[in-house]
Image (cartoon, rainbow, N blue to C red):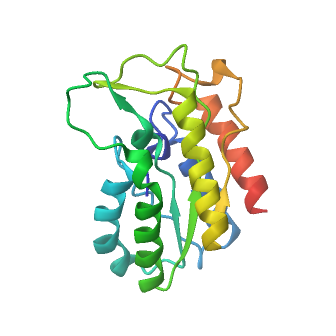
Amino acid sequence: MGDSIAYGRCDPHGGWAARFAATHIAGNETEHRVFNLAIPGSTLIDVCEQTPPLLAARRPDTLLVAAGINDCALPLDTAQARSDGLAHIADRLASLADTAQSHNARLVVMGPTWLDETRTRDYEGLRFTLARAQALRESIRAWCVQNHIDHLDMWEPLNGRAELLVDGLHPTPEGHQALSRHLNALSG
């Protein structure tokens, strides 16, 4: 479950998630399955709403959530009504943990990737800042520690490597490859 980065936007090979799936499935073709259910633009509240009906038929043992960067975006139009997604990260993650547990699945939460604020353009009326992405990273990490939930920190593979981002936010194919290598190293 996740957003446009988890979906694989800007990579004709399906991004880090497709590479992870290929590696995971190759480890045991009979027992290993991966369903990438990411939807570009998703916030954690969207993921919370989308997840429950998708789990029953798939019977996962693990729910990997790679979302949240859209929650830290700020509207360009300050008059636009939009709640601050960062203020509700813990509530959203708790809801996902409850959903995973009710389906006998383990929740694993991926933190956000680094972004290059100097290159993130106004995207669909939203502005992404490094400070808010860092706050999101810390909020997710702290919640996972406090709640004994597995956390994958995805910041470092792209940190300071602007050439691995198409638009300051979305990884290039090479950026997705770097994320995939990092994820494979973390998952051993």
Quadrant for the N terminus in the image: bottom left
**Residue 37 point in image, percent of width and height:** 39, 57
Q: Position of residue 36 (x, y in %)?
A: 45, 57
The residue at the point 70 percent across, 37 percent down is 178
- Residue 155 placement: quadrant: top right
Question: Could one spot residue 112 in this view of the protein?
Answer: no
Q: Is residue 89 above or below residue 174?
A: below
Above/below status of 157 relative to 1: above
Q: Position of residue 144 (x, y in %)?
A: 61, 64
Give the position of the C terminus as an image quadrant. Answer: bottom right
**Which sits in the foreground, 62 or 45?**
45
**Image label count:** 0
User: Along the horizontal axis of the image, is 103 left or right of 161?
Assistant: left
Residue 165 visible to an observer of this rendering: yes
- Residue at 28% from the left image edge and 73% from the top image edge: 53
On the picture, is 13 further left or further right than 182? Answer: left
Q: Residue furthest top?
A: 118
Residue at 50% of width from left, 26% of height from top? Answer: 129
**Position of residue 93 measured from the top left corner of the image (x, y, whole percent):** 47, 63
